[in-house]
Amino acid sequence: MNQTKVNPYSRSVSIIGVGCTPFMYTVDKEETNGLTEGELFGYASLKAMEDAGVNPQDIDFYFHGCASPLNGSNYLTPNIQVANWFGMKGKASIHHSEACCTGYYAVEQAVNAVASGKYNCVLSACIEFGDSLAVPNHPYKREKMTMEKFLATTSWLYDRNYTRSLMAGQELIYDDAAEWYKRTRGLTDEQMDDTLIHMSLNNRKNASKNELAIERRTYEELAKEAGYDDVMDYMRSPYNPKNGDFLRMSGIELKCDGAAAVIVCATDMVDKYMGNKSHKAIEVLGSGCAACEATTPHFEVTATEEAVRQVYDVTGVKPDEIDIFYANDFIITSHLVSAEIAGYLPYGEGWKYICEGRTAYDGDKPINTNGGRTSFGHAHAASGLADLYECVKQMRGECGDHQVKKLPKTAMLRGYGGAQNICTYIIRTIDGMETVPAEKKESVVKLTKVVQGFYDYLEEGKIMGRKCPKCGAVEFPPVYACNSCGSLETEWVEISGKAKMHSIVMPAPLSNKPEYKALGKFAYGEIELEEGSRLNAVVRGITKKTRKELLDKLPLDVHAAIFQRDGYKTVVFDLDEKYLQ
């Protein structure tokens, strides 16, 4: 297999802010059903900004990660659609997808962008609706993604020329690592089964104390509910069946919805950008990456070995310096296999550490203190940044009831996914950086259903925007943050409906859809609301015949109107009566 020599960064880069949504089944609960891509991505991004103490205007560029945007979100260019939500309207961005490794490469890409010198401060965030699908032709409704629909898309991860036809690669993902570990370490079937079960128990124990985790009920609690006194009997029972030779259902991801974000800047500019001095910046020392297409035998093991070799070579860090470890374990065996390859757990002994509980948050070798993919949840692209969020919080000592015993200084995170990408990086708290205790304040960033609220108001006959309490600018259509001053919060305000039309563009034959007939005669144009917002909109009452005369009168007085589309109401504009006489 090919190997890569990784060079040190051209300049040091550090993490100054992190943010994360709860991982959730959005459509299952009234309070979250209706949340949109912009709201989840925007919330995580704004939380990272609040954490760092930066203004959206301080950030030069952002990366957007989503594993399957067309399938889950009905977008081909998802990065373009979200910037307004977190105050970065007009800022450049790139979308990327590396399947379940997307959130780890999100760090890699942001750090490279700053290390190159092109940008000084970069946001990188990821979102995934792993448990729900966008309802076509509706602005916010979603429906449950059934397992049948989900599995129908997983073949997209694999080469269609050979891997799919050869049939083995996509199936080996479940048990290959467990078989490899059992055989190379000389375990019995019973020992391997016990190890996989204890990984699930440890993950759930970690998640049980994490308010962002999707599943917080411990297996001990579930065992009692099912009538079992011994949790191990429960874990070996039909309540936790085997999915194949080794893997049980407790060792498989809980697919869900969520978003997470990170902000990085040049280390020598931390004082400039990092307004929140209550915590230290964390330097990204280096990364290692590899990828093995799924016809490669033991592809996860092989690619992890190469990525780990790279990151140790480029950073000079030794395995015994790693204080805490995270691995993307949507197949739970991953965190055992990768921890041993990284030298975080001793070769051939890692399974014992797991079975003894030493890798839980309160052990001496903590792994996946958030609960990993089997308990914290797996919002595919977002999971890697959710791991980073947890890791950063642990390194600051901010994890409360599930804080590890020894404050970690150096951490390794290993991403995995996409049949199969591996991205591994090492981060370290910066010594000597003074912190200033901050007064604890309630966060101004709220995860609220602004989009649904907008359409609900239309049903009541109200046209609403969001007003910035700091500069007074009005965002229409409504979003979370202010794109004028960068304030992280806005509040509802009713729009007067008075506006000016600054341009006229007649519908082209290619865009003249049958559903638009109910509009009557209309044109498109730039609209300026009385409140100051500008947007492209439909204006009724303009014909090809009257267009020439109206062009000479620009800007035209228009007023907003509520228009019924199929299944929901929207906003259009009408020419004022004086032009129709």
Image (tube, helix red, strand yellow):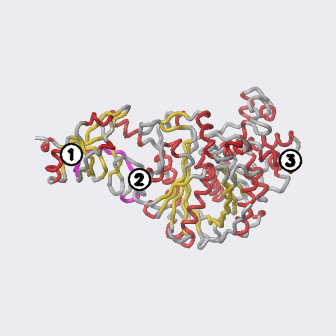
Near-viewer residue (537 or 350): 537
Q: Which residue is mark 3?
A: 183
Residue 463 sits in which quadrant? top left
Q: Position of residue 203 (x, y in %)?
A: 71, 44
Q: Amino acid at mark 1?
A: Val
Q: Is residue 62 above or below residue 254?
A: below
Viewer can see residue 208: no
Residue 1 shows up from this direction: yes
Asked if the residue under mark 2 is in contact with the one under mark 1, i.e. CB atoms within 8 Å, the reply is no
Above or below: residue 425 compared with residue 466:
below
Q: Which mark is residue 84?
A: 2
Left or right side of 482 for 369: right
Closer to the eye: label 3 or 2: 3
Which numbered disc, 3 or 2, marks the residue that appears first in the sequence? 2
The residue stretch that appears in magenta: 484-501
- Give the class, few, some or many, for how many residues have Cα within 10 Å of label 1's Cα (few <14, many ≥20): many
Identity of the residue drawn at 80% across and 38% down = 245
What's the distance in space between the residues labelled 3 and 2, CA to CA? 53 Å
